[in-house]
Amino acid sequence: MSPVLKWHLVLHLAQEIEDDRQEAETLLGALREKDSLLKGTVEEEGAENLFYDLPAFGKEAVMEENRLVQVYEAWFSLFGGLLKDHELLITTNQQIMAHVSGIWQEYVMGDEGTAEMGVAFRLPDFSHLSLEDLLSMRGRALGSPVLDEVRKAIMAFWEDPKGGVTLLKKRAEEIEKAFPKGLGKGTLSVTMNYLKPGVPHKIKDLWREFSGKTLILVSEETTS
């Protein structure tokens, strides 16, 4: 089997796993919603909260560490050549964010450095909008001084990570409010971690691909 075919198969299987996880999460959400409609109609005490005690699938580890490393190797082998230095790497997989950030915390940055290089904030979820509505919203929203400041801080995050973290934390409450009201459906949680330049010792050369880049997790904010 050629390396290129192997890399494609690894990514395809990883996507299948992610699709199954998302489908299970959607099903659980539907069951919770249905369960809430039955409140007051079930006689057994506690039965109405049957599905609310189940954890969200997105918070559970899906792949073992060696499998994750294979996914990283396949992705960077196929697409790494297209990346520029200090690129923003975006994922919707919480396990990837936790794994990569954990490697950097343990081998490169330490506890104090991790706290200084990471920030989280919230955004409205516009995924349900049509392209026309998105373009219209973009035209109105990007005129906001707050969002323009935030956009510039994100794009240049690598130049001054500590300054970017300070600014984004300061603007965290203003970011969501700066978007047009009534368009968002739900809320997205955005977590940014700057991976300080350096390669963890005893780790494969693969990790050089992450060095100096900003890892961003975008996930749907759920309420229990």
Image: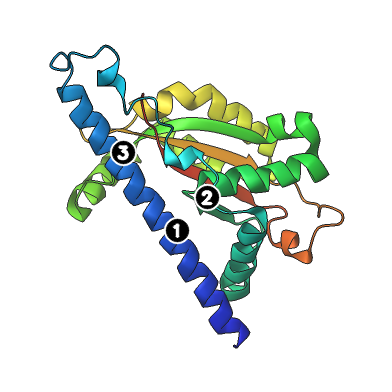
Residue flagged by tag 3: what amino acid is it? Leu
In the depicted structure, whether residue 212 falls above or below residue 9: above
Residue ID at (24%, 35%) = 31
**Residue 190 placed where, x, y %?**
48, 37
The mark nearer the N terminus, 3 or 1, is 1
Relative vertical location of residue 95 with respect to residue 202 in this rendering, above or below: above
Q: Helix, strand or loop at disc 1?
A: helix
Is residue 71 found left or right of 32 in the rendered image? right
Tag 1 or tag 2, which sits nearer the N-term?
1
Residues packed near mark 2 inside 10 Å, few (<14), some (14 to 19) or many (20 plus): some
Distance from disc 3 to disc 2, alpha carbons, whole Å, reads 16 Å
Residue 167, image x, y percentages: 57, 28
Looking at the image, which is closer to me, 168 or 54? 54
- For badge 1, the amino acid type reads Ile
* Residue at the disc numbered 2: 62
Q: In this figure, which residue is indicated by the disc labeled 1?
A: 17
Residue drawn 76% across the image and 33% down it: 113
User: At which x and y percent is residue 222?
Assistant: 37, 31
Residue furthest out toward the right: 201
The answer to whether residue 43 is above or below residue 107 is above
Q: Say whether residue 89 is visible.
A: yes
Q: Are marks 3 and 2 in contact (CB under 8 Å)?
A: no
Would residue 14 appear left or right of 176 to someone viewing this image?
right
Quarter holding the C terminus is top left
Q: Earlier in the sequence, mark 3 or mark 2?
A: 3
Residue under numbered circle 3: 28
Question: Badge 1 local density, few (<14 within 10 Å), some, or many (20+)?
Answer: some
Tell me how far mark 2 sits from mark 1, CA to CA. 8 Å
